[in-house]
Amino acid sequence: MSSSDWDASTYDLLSTPQQEWGVAVLDRLALAGDETALDAGCGTGRLTEALLERLPRGRAVAIDRSPNMLQVAAANLRPRFAGRVAFVRADAAALPFRDAADVIFSTATFHWVQDHARLFASLHAALKPGGRLIAQCGGGPNLKRLLARASSLAAADRFARHLTGWIDPWFFADAETTARRLEAAGFVEVETWTHPSPVRFDTAAEYRDFLACVCVRAYCARLPGPDRDGFLDGLADLSAGDDPPFTLDYWRLNLAGRKPGEEVTRK
């Protein structure tokens, strides 16, 4: 596994918060059941499965940059949805589609894309006229407390020597800026808003495992074993003093829009 890829099997076990957020987003998406939908950032396919269940006469394209995620997603989905799901390795900001989808759905992905103007242009191009985008990602003050602590720890000599040239791999936009970017990309009927969605873990071990796989995995990929363990232990120790302890200060950015034009008749 490359340092930029995901531990997909572990993520599949730990991603209950992402699953719950995604189902709430799906609940806001009205579907006829025969659409072609793109799941941009499908991960291990847990939400793609929920999407396909709402498309009994439709199909979905599961898209991710991670080959590990796509491999697990294919294993999860092909036995049940063969013929109605395809898997494409692609960057959401450079989708290989034009006027292809009735719906683009995405959760917990867009904050991993640095250039949101390019991202929204790519999504707009991939939609059919009249097609809809509905998505959610980290935004606003997402994980502000955790990432401030991670940045402070990373400055210590023990860790800093492994993190030369560090650049944050995430980008948390606010609702107002996101609305302007969506409109600039050509979307209409744009809606954006943020809301807090803290996630609490029962034990330090559960908190630490989640950090390693999801929140600070980019740090962990650069740190050798003993220093990685020390980094995670330091974050867990700091969180133990919070009230309540072992709580991640998640904020979600919700976004929706439509590509102008009459929707193409589906066959």
Image (cartoon, rainbow, N blue to C red):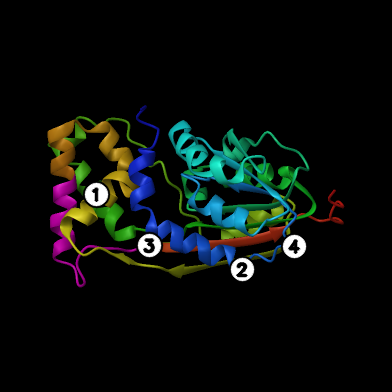
Instruction: Please rate how many residues cluster around mark 2, counting C-alpha atoms within 10 Å: few if below 14, some from 14 to 19, many from 20.
Output: few
User: Which residue corresponds to mark 2?
Assistant: 28
Instruction: Please rate how many residues cluster around mark 3, counting C-alpha atoms within 10 Å: few if below 14, some from 14 to 19, many from 20.
Output: some
Which label belongs to residue 32? 4
Q: Residue at x 12, y 35 (%)?
A: 226
Which label belongs to residue 250? 3
Q: Nearer the viewer, mark 1 or mark 4?
A: 4
Give the image location of residue 114, x and y in percent: 50, 42
Could you tell which of marks 3 and 1 lies nearer the N-terminus?
Answer: 1
User: Which residue corresponds to mark 1?
Assistant: 209
Q: Estimate the spatial distance between the alpha carbons at disc 1 and disc 2, rounded to whole Å.
A: 31 Å
Q: Nearer the viewer, residue 82 or 158?
A: 82
- In this picture, which residue range is highlighted in magenta? 232-250
Three-letter amino acid code of the residue under disc 4: Ala
Q: Estimate the spatial distance between the alpha carbons at disc 4 and disc 3, rounded to whole Å.
A: 32 Å
Q: Are marks 3 and 1 in contact (CB under 8 Å)?
A: no
- Residue 122 is left or right of residue 259, and the answer is left
Could you tell which of marks 2 and 3 lies nearer the N-terminus?
Answer: 2
